[in-house]
Image (cartoon, helix red, strand yellow):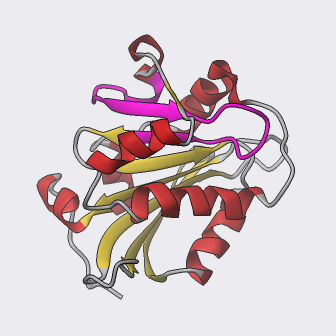
Amino acid sequence: MQARKLHSTGLGRLAATVLAVAAYGVAGAHAGNEEEAAYANFEAFCLDHLTTQQDIARIAGAVGLRQIPDDLKFPIFGDHSGTAWTSVGNKNKFMLALFENGACGVSAIDADGDGVIEVLRANSHNQQLARDKVGSEIDTMFALTYPDRNGGPDRRALVVVQTSSLKTISAGTRLTAFSEEAAKKSGLPIPEWP
């Protein structure tokens, strides 16, 4: 139920996000480890800039991400607002979304959810808080402590990994992070941090 509450704070359905990514020209196969690439993009954009999200728009433009026009963002944000970008080309395809409530997410159409969860578990201090299934969509929520690369205090985030139980199609994976402050503002329960 905790992971399901995150849906009401701005997380769209995984299938709608995957369709939006595909419709905006990010579909297709790419070489490399998709699960590691998905986590690396999430780490570089969302976790590294958890408390300095104003930097994300500048960085997204600098690395060549293309901003998604407002009329195509509804499947991503639903009733909420935010800014979204997509990668272009046939390598390292992902979509980056910043929600007005402070959440930051990365969607990767080619990444297997279980593999992404393995990468997250191996590369962070985390504790699984919940795992909810709604239809074929599975939301797994973690409390995550992430070291500051500049030597500052560790960062804390609630992270939701949205996956699909449908293994015969590429449903993709979506990782979304709420900083501790954003989680409090959204009324989410604050866990014991790992």
Up/down of 87 relative to 35, above or below: above
User: Residue 71's spot in the image, x, y percent?
Assistant: 42, 11
Residue 1 in view (yes/no): no
Rendered-image quadrant of the N terminus: bottom left
Left or right: 192, with 17 as reference point: left
Residue found at x 47% / y 36%: 61
Residue 121 position (above or below residue 54): below
Q: Percent position (x, y) of residue 191?
A: 25, 78
What residue is shown at x 71% (from left), y 46% (from top)?
92
Residues in magenta, as a range: 75-97
Residue furthest out toward the front: 62
Magenta-colored stretch includes residue 158: no
Report which quarter residue 14 is drawn in: top right
Residue 90 colored in magenta in the image: yes
Q: Is residue 63 visible?
A: yes
Give residue 29's quadrant in the image.
top right
Q: Position of residue 131 (x, y in %)?
A: 49, 66
- The one nearer the camera, 105 or 85, is 85
